[in-house]
Image (spheres, helix red, strand yellow):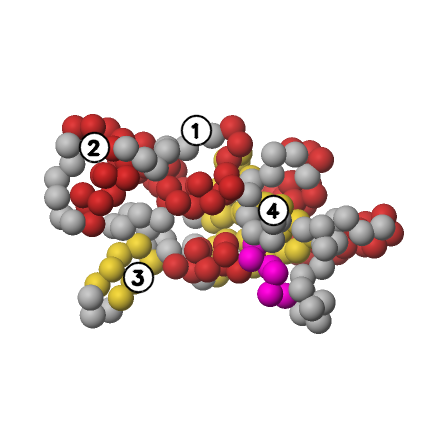
Amino acid sequence: MAKLLHIEASPRKDRSRSTQVAHTFLAAYQKSRPDGSIETLDLWATPLPSFNGDTIEAKYAILRGQPHTPGQAEAWKSVVDVIERFKSADKYLFSLPMWNFGVPYILKHYIDVLIQPGLTFSFDPQLGYKGLVTGKKAAAIYARGGAYGPGTGMEDYDLQSKMLAGVLGFIGLTDLVNIFVEPTLAPPEVSEAGFAKAEELAVSTAKSF
């Protein structure tokens, strides 16, 4: 039974366009995959390890091939627990708003916990970096106030989808479908048309996901 992990990065809950489209995606997915399971990870309600003190020293101990102190081992376990929950999924759905052209800081925090040597990537002096989370599908639903697609003149400002796609590709998640909900801050007739287009794409994507 395949497990889909929905990583929700908007604090606006049901007022969030990215969350609304994610719910549409999940409903269509559940209908087409009744034997599958869905788990939602609300990042705003999830305690994440702080990367300071024993936690950061534990990471550097790994990089230097040194053993952990008891305090470092305890701190590192909280990091491993987050990563193991992530890696336990077979498929991923990310839903997130654009903040200052990028991603919400809570999602960046989550990413900084996930990207760890030996757990989600490896490094070889001859071969370079290699992602360790492979053979899995991912979809991302991006909400943003303006339009940032090809021909808008705003493409370079889209650090939201570029950052997430880059990070996911680094750890091996290269099978990624992007769904854009934009422009959410346009006049109602324009924003609703963009929302409807995203909902339609979410349904068609979910059916074959």
Q: Nearer the viewer, mark 3 or mark 4?
A: 4
Q: Residue at x 34, y 37 (%)?
A: 51
The mark nearer the N terminus, 2 or 3, is 2
The mark nearer the N terminus, 3 or 1, is 1
| Real-space CA distance between mark 3 and mark 1, rounded to the nearest whole angstrom | 28 Å
Q: Amino acid at mark 1?
A: Pro
The quadrant of the image that shows the N terminus is: top left
Q: Nearer the viewer, mark 1 or mark 4?
A: 4
Q: Quadrant of residue 89?
A: top left
Q: Nearer the viewer, mark 2 or mark 3?
A: 2
Dominant SS in magenta: helix
Q: Nearer the viewer, mark 4 or mark 2?
A: 4
Secondary structure, mark 1, is: loop
Q: Which residue is mark 1?
A: 47
Q: Which residue is mark 4?
A: 99
Q: Amino acid at mark 3?
A: Lys
The mark nearer the N terminus, 1 or 4, is 1
Q: Is residue 171 visible?
A: yes
Secondary structure, mark 2, is: helix
The quadrant of the image that shows the C terminus is: bottom right
Q: Residue at x 83, y 54 (%)?
A: 190
Neighbour tally class for label 3: few under 14, some 14-19, many 20 plus, Cα within 10 Å:
some
Q: Position of residue 184 (x, y in %)?
A: 75, 49
The circle drawn on residue 130 is 3
Q: Position of residue 108 (x, y in %)?
A: 47, 45
Q: Position of residue 115 (x, y in %)?
A: 36, 49
Q: Which residue is mark 2?
A: 73
Q: Which residues are magenta?
A: 155-160
Secondary structure, mark 4, is: loop
The mark nearer the N terminus, 4 or 2, is 2
